Image (cartoon, helix red, strand yellow):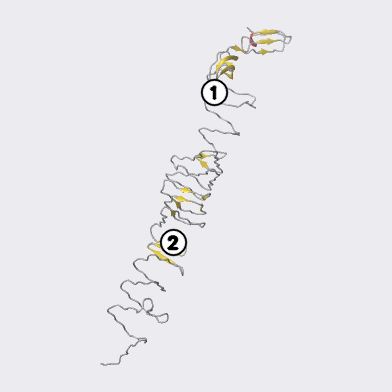
């Protein structure tokens, strides 16, 4: 059926209900014409191909596939949340919904500035952590698979346990004073051989309270050492028992407050010669002896007696003197030691047993 149609002339604004085209729709002049306006907008745009847009301003965008190259996100308004595979970035939180979260610097450093790094899980495969590592609660696990791992800086505070497996823990002072403070436990070896080594210079290990280093070292403990060397004074509050073969006292002077010294106490069953040997100077480790001779049962003297000797042949015997308190002649019962004894009466008479 015939109807009236509008004729478009130059300078007019055409109005169409529907446009279909089998070819291209082209503007007359490049970069001059708009498709819609701010107040009169098209509703939906369907493109099955490539959209070449110099600048895109969109209230929302849902991109399900493809790539986005060379762009900056959040220039005019911050991106509030991003989901990248299993990693979700939302505000100040980065969360991996499954698997491990790996950050790689391609040979460089990963820096957190002056802020804190908090974790309740594990930090693994770390070749170097520099700065300050502090924990007031549970730090979790700090683990490295490298042959050398370092925690640098000036302070490492540990409120729990420090455990290393198949590696060494080294505190390098580098010419300055450093302190490691343990509020809990330090275990070395865990049933196997372990060593705590202080190398070079002067070092101090202070063990307090009920701490244990291989055995109890507190003041009331029974401690066993292979050998002990001290450069200062040693005070023994109880008995000193020496079970070795030789006791060496290398002092300038020996002062003993005991009234009596008891020698050869281990020979009660067999009886031996015993006394004091003084270095004579003529031969090393030999000297003159003042001793009690077991054969004569009297005090004797001898020369060139070895410091390690156990039996001595008397050179002479010590003369003993008895004063009976009267003027009578001595009798056989007055003999105590034998030949050479002297007997002196009150009147001055001297008797010698021979």
Give residue 267's position: percent from left, percent from top: 54, 21
Toward which corner of the image does residue 276 lie, by quadrant?
top right
Secondary element type, mark 1: helix
Residue 346 as seen in the image, left or right of residue 116: right
Give residue 89's position: percent from left, percent from top: 43, 63
Q: Is residue 36 above or below residue 186?
A: below
Q: Mark 1 points at which residue?
A: 266
Q: Name the residue under label 2.
A: 94
Seen from this angle, which residue lies furthest right? 347
| Dots 2, 1 in contact, CB < 8 A | no
In the depicted view, which residue is nearer to us: 189 or 319?
Answer: 189
Q: Dot 2: few (<14), some (14–19), or many (≥20) neighbours within 10 Å?
A: some
In the depicted view, which residue is nearer to us: 71 or 272?
Answer: 71
Give residue 9's position: percent from left, percent from top: 34, 88
The quadrant of the image that shows the C terminus is: top right
Toward which corner of the image does residue 17 lie, by quadrant?
bottom left
């Amino acid at each position: 059926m015939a109807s009236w149609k509008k004729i478009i002339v130059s300078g007019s604004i055409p109005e169409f209900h529907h446009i279909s085209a089998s070819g291209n729709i082209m503007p007359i002049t490049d970069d001059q014409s708009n498709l819609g306006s701010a107040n009169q907008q098209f509703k939906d745009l369907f493109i099955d191909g490539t959209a070449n847009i110099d600048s895109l301003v969109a209230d929302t965008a849902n991109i399900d596939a493809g790539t986005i190259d060379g762009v900056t996100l959040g220039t005019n308004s911050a991106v509030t949340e991003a989901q990248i595979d299993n990693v979700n970035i939302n505000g100040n939180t980065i969360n991996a919904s499954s698997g491990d979260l790996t950050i790689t610097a391609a040979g460089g450093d990963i820096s957190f500035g002056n802020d804190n790094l908090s974790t309740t899980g594990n930090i693994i495969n770390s070749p170097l952590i520099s700065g300050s590592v502090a924990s007031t609660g549970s730090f979790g696990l700090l683990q490295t698979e490298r042959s050398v791992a370092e925690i640098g800086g000036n302070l490492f505070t540990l409120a729990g346990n420090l455990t290393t497996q198949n590696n060494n823990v080294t505190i390098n002072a580098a010419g300055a004073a450093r302190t490691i403070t343990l509020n809990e436990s330090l275990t070395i070896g865990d049933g196997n051989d372990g060593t705590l080594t202080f190398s070079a210079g002067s070092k101090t290990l202070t063990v307090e309270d009920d701490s244990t280093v291989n055995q109890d070292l507190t003041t009331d403990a029974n401690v066993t050492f292979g050998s002990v060397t001290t450069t200062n004074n040693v005070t023994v509050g109880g008995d000193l028992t020496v079970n070795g073969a030789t006791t060496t006292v290398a002092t300038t002077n020996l002062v003993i407050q005991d009234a009596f010294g008891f020698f050869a106490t281990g020979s009660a069953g067999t009886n031996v010669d015993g006394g004091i040997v003084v270095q004579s100077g003529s031969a090393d480790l030999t000297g003159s002896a003042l001793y009690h001779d077991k054969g004569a049962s009297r005090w004797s003297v001898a020369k060139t007696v070895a410091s390690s000797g156990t039996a001595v042949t008397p050179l002479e015997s010590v003369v003993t003197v008895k004063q009976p308190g009267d003027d009578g002649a001595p009798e056989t019962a007055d003999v105590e030691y034998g030949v050479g004894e002297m007997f002196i009466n009150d009147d001055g008479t001297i008797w010698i047993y021979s």
